[in-house]
C-alpha cells in the first residue's frame, strides 16, 4: 500500500514537472497554503517533516560565537528570469563565486521571498533574497539578504521589468548585464548555521549565511512581487541541537 502511494506520488511529480516545463497553467504540486502547504510537505519529501536541521529559523539578535567572514567575487553578466510558480528566480552566467570557510562555491541563481523566511528576534522583514551557490562537490551554500521597505531598488526594478508573462518559461534578458553584488549591503557581518532548502525536497547540510545588514525595496516593488507570486515564506523551523555562529 505504501509502495503504491509513493508510486502514485512519483507520477504526480512527473506530471507537474511536465506541465511546468512547457509552461502549462497547471498549479505546481506543492504550495504555501492549504492541502499542499508546508504542513503537508512531508508527503513530497520525508525530511521536510522529520529533518532536525531545517530552515528557515528565528535568528537571535545577538550571537556570542564570533562571526566568520565571507568573500564575494561576483561579476556582471547576462541573466535569465523565471516565474516558477513559487518565486521569481534569476539565473546568472558562470563566473560569480563566494568563499566560505576556504571553500569556493559558484553562484547559480537568486530568488526572492515575501515576507522574509528567516526572522530576527521573532520579527520578519518585508522580503528576503536568497543567493544559491554550489561547489564542485555538489554542496550548497545560500546567502540570505533581508529586504526592508524603503527606497526603490534599481536591480529589482530591472528584474521586475523583464519578467515573462508565462509561469515556468525562462526569459533571457537582452542587452542587460547585472552584477549580483549590487544586491548586497555594504556590511557583510553574518549569521552562519547548517540548514536546509526552504522548499521541497528540503534537503539538509546547506550552509546558510544570512547577512545582518539589510537592503531596501520599495512598497510598490514588494506589492508587485506579492501580486505575481503571493506570500511564499515557509514557517520558522526548530533550531534543535544546532549552533548559530
Ligand atoms: Zn529561497
Image (cartoon, helix red, strand yellow):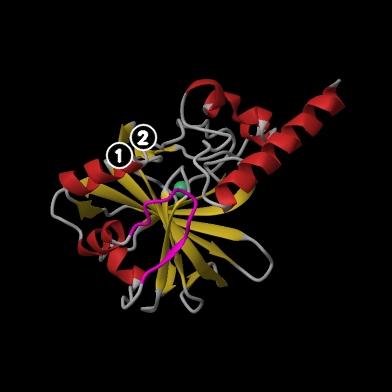
Which residue is painted at 58% across and 52% down in the image?
Answer: 21
Q: Nearest the camera: 187 or 96? A: 96
Q: Is residue 203 visible?
A: no
Q: Which disc is residue 231 wearing?
A: 2
User: Which corner quadrant holds the N terminus?
Assistant: top right
Q: Secondary structure at mark 1?
A: helix
Q: Place residue 30 in its image quadrant.
A: top right
Whole-percent x, y for residue 100 in the image: 51, 66
Whole-percent x, y for residue 244 in the image: 48, 46
Which residue is painted at 26% across and 53% down in the image?
Answer: 214
Ligand 1 within 8 Å, label 1 CB: no
Indicate whether 149 appears above or below 143: above
Indicate whether 55 appears above or below 109: above
**Residue 6 in magenta?**
no
Asked whether the residues under the numbered discs 1 and 2 touch, taking CB atoms below 8 Å apart as contact, a structural biologist would say yes
Work out how far the residue at label 1 is from the one at label 2, CA to CA, in angstroms. 6 Å
Majority secondary structure in the magenta region: loop
Q: Nearest the camera: 194 or 153? A: 153
Whole-percent x, y for residue 122 in the image: 34, 31
Q: Nearest the camera: 53 or 87? A: 87
Q: Which disc is residue 216 wearing?
A: none
Indicate whether 185 appears above or below 233: below
Q: Nearest the camera: 238 or 107? A: 107
Left of 174 or right of it: where is 236? Answer: right
Q: Is residue 151 visible?
A: yes
Name the residue that disc number 1 marks.
Answer: 226
Mark 2: give few (<14), some (14-19) or many (20+) Cα within 10 Å: some
Q: Secondary structure at mark 2?
A: loop
Which residue is painted at 52% across and 30% down in the image?
Answer: 238
Dot 1 or dot 2: first in sequence order is 1
- Residue that sits furthest to the left in the current view: 151
Which residues are drawn in magenta?
A: 163-173
Amino acid at each position: 500500500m505504501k509502495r503504491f502511494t509513493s508510486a502514485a506520488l512519483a507520477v504526480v511529480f512527473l506530471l507537474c514537472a511536465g506541465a511546468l516545463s512547457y509552461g502549462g497553467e497547471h498549479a505546481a504540486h506543492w504550495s504555501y497554503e492549504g492541502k499542499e502547504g508546508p504542513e503537508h510537505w512531508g508527503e513530497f519529501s520525508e525530511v521536510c517533516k522529520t529533518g532536525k536541521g531545517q530552515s528557515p529559523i528565528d535568528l537571535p539578535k545577538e550571537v556570542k560565537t564570533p562571526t566568520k567572514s565571507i568573500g564575494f567575487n561576483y561579476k556582471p553578466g547576462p541573466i535569465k528570469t523565471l516565474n516558477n510558480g513559487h518565486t521569481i528566480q534569476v539565473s546568472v552566467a558562470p563566473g560569480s563565486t563566494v568563499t566560505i570557510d576556504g571553500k569556493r562555491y559558484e553562484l547559480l541563481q537568486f530568488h526572492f521571498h515575501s515576507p522574509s523566511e528567516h526572522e530576527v528576534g521573532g520579527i520578519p522583514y518585508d522580503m528576503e533574497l536568497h543567493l544559491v551557490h554550489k561547489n564542485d562537490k555538489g554542496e550548497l551554500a545560500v546567502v540570505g539578504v533581508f529586504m526592508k521597505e524603503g527606497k526603490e531598488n534599481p536591480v529589482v526594478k530591472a528584474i521586475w521589468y523583464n519578467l515573462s508573462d508565462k509561469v515556468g518559461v525562462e526569459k533571457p534578458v537582452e542587452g542587460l548585464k547585472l552584477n549580483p553584488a549590487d544586491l548586497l549591503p555594504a556590511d557583510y557581518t553574518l549569521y552562519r548555521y547548517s540548514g536546509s532548502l526552504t522548499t521541497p525536497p528540503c534537503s539538509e547540510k546547506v550552509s546558510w549565511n544570512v547577512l545582518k545588514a539589510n537592503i531596501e525595496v520599495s512598497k510598490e516593488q514588494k506589492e508587485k512581487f506579492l501580486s505575481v507570486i503571493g506570500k511564499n515564506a515557509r514557517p520558522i523551523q526548530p533550531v534543535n541541537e544546532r549552533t548559530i555562529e
